[in-house]
Image (spheres, rainbow, N blue to C red):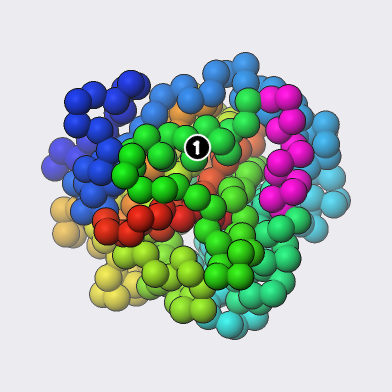
Amino acid sequence: MNWPALEIEKPLGEAPGKDYLKGLAAGEYPATIFRQVLSATECEGIMTRLIERDLLFDPVAGIPEKFRQESIPEGHYREGNEDQALRAWRSEQTGTVGDEKIRIDIGTSLGYRGSDREGFLNHSAESNALLDSIFEDLTNPIEKLYEHLQLLAPTQRVCTAVEPDGRKYGKAIVRAHYGGYSYAPHFDSVRRREKRTDYQAYRFEHQFAGVLVLQNTVLDGVSAQCRIHKCFWEPEVQPYLAENKFHEYAENNSIANADIVLQPGDLYFFNTGCIHEVPGVAGEDARVVLATFIGYSEDDPEIYVWS
Ligand SMILES: O=C(O)CCC(=O)C(=O)O
Ligand SMILES: [Fe+2]
């Protein structure tokens, strides 16, 4: 049950481009990884900037109240035009334990805000202005992410997702996970999960994620890693996800999986139609990533990126 990720060395070899994303779309490998797109020093510089600007906090001094208020609960998303948030999985935690699991988003999430179209597009414009200003005089991790995606798709144009009237989605999102905040097994799909028929991003056959690690959290030598299962979401899998029983299902069906082991500065792309998870690690630091979703069809001249 070998299903190794594809490590991509730069400069790309003789046969670059199209086939990488085709392979990812087909589930031929769990992920493509670019190592050290940013150096450790560049990642630290970004983390310092985010704390200086009061967009994130240093957990050593406790959780400031403002961040408690802003925290996004585990597994929340909305469907279609509903304002009721749904949960992608049942939470194991209740009460005080869960209170320390904080997730802070810097940016705009389509999954979380997209049910209010006007609100989403306004919020996106504000986030994009903020994101442009945050990285001034630093290496811009968003540009790095887009550039590397473009390397994988030389015949298509990588751009931020945009509606016909020219309004853009959030170009990327910084997500900080404190206190062992985790993602239980789930999939992400504008088409098949959130059913956002009223957005351009709906047109793509495949959805990927591009994630650049800015800071890891480590506990007893173990860091939080994304685990990807060789299993595309299908309606028959849904009951197992909803009941937190996917691991049982995977074992019974001998489904392979891959742990994507990453250091700060590493960038990976994976197919979000495959069931994936990030088991939390309640280390001292937050796990901080720059995250995007990506819409891809083999024959589409464009590849859309959003958050
Ligand atoms: O943080 C990651 O590496 C992936 C997180 C994820 O699965 C998601 O944001 O949907
Ligand atoms: Fe995900």
195 left or right of 66 in image: left
- Specify the quadrant of the image occupied by residue 39: top right
220 left or right of 233 in image: right
Q: Say which of 190 and 188 sits in front.
A: 190
The picture places residue 44, in percent across and down from the top left corner, at 66, 22
Q: Say which of 139 and 58 sits in front.
A: 139
Q: Say which of 46 and 4 sits in front.
A: 46
- Specify the quadrant of the image occupied by residue 93: bottom right
The picture places residue 235, in percent across and down from the top left corner, at 29, 75
Extreme residue toward the right, this view: 65
Q: Main secondary structure of the magenta part?
A: helix
The region drawn magenta spans: 127-138
Total numbered badges shown on the rendered structure: 1
Please determine whether, in this image, residue 10 is positioned above or below residue 246: above
Extreme residue toward the bottom, this view: 82
Q: Is residue 75 visible?
A: yes
The picture places residue 287, in percent across and down from the top left corner, at 59, 37
The picture places residue 173, in percent across and down from the top left corner, at 61, 48
32 left or right of 254 in image: right
Check if residue 198 falls in the magenta segment: no
Residue plotted at (49% across, 75% down): 196
- Specify the quadrant of the image occupied by residue 301: bottom left
Residue highlighted by disc 1: 145
Residue plotted at (22% across, 35% down): 4
Q: Is residue 220 visible?
A: no
Please determine whether, in this image, residue 44 is positioned above or below residue 275: above
| Secondary structure category for the residue under label 1 | helix
Residue plotted at (66% across, 76% down): 116
Q: Say which of 228 and 210 sits in front.
A: 210
Check if residue 131 falls in the magenta segment: yes
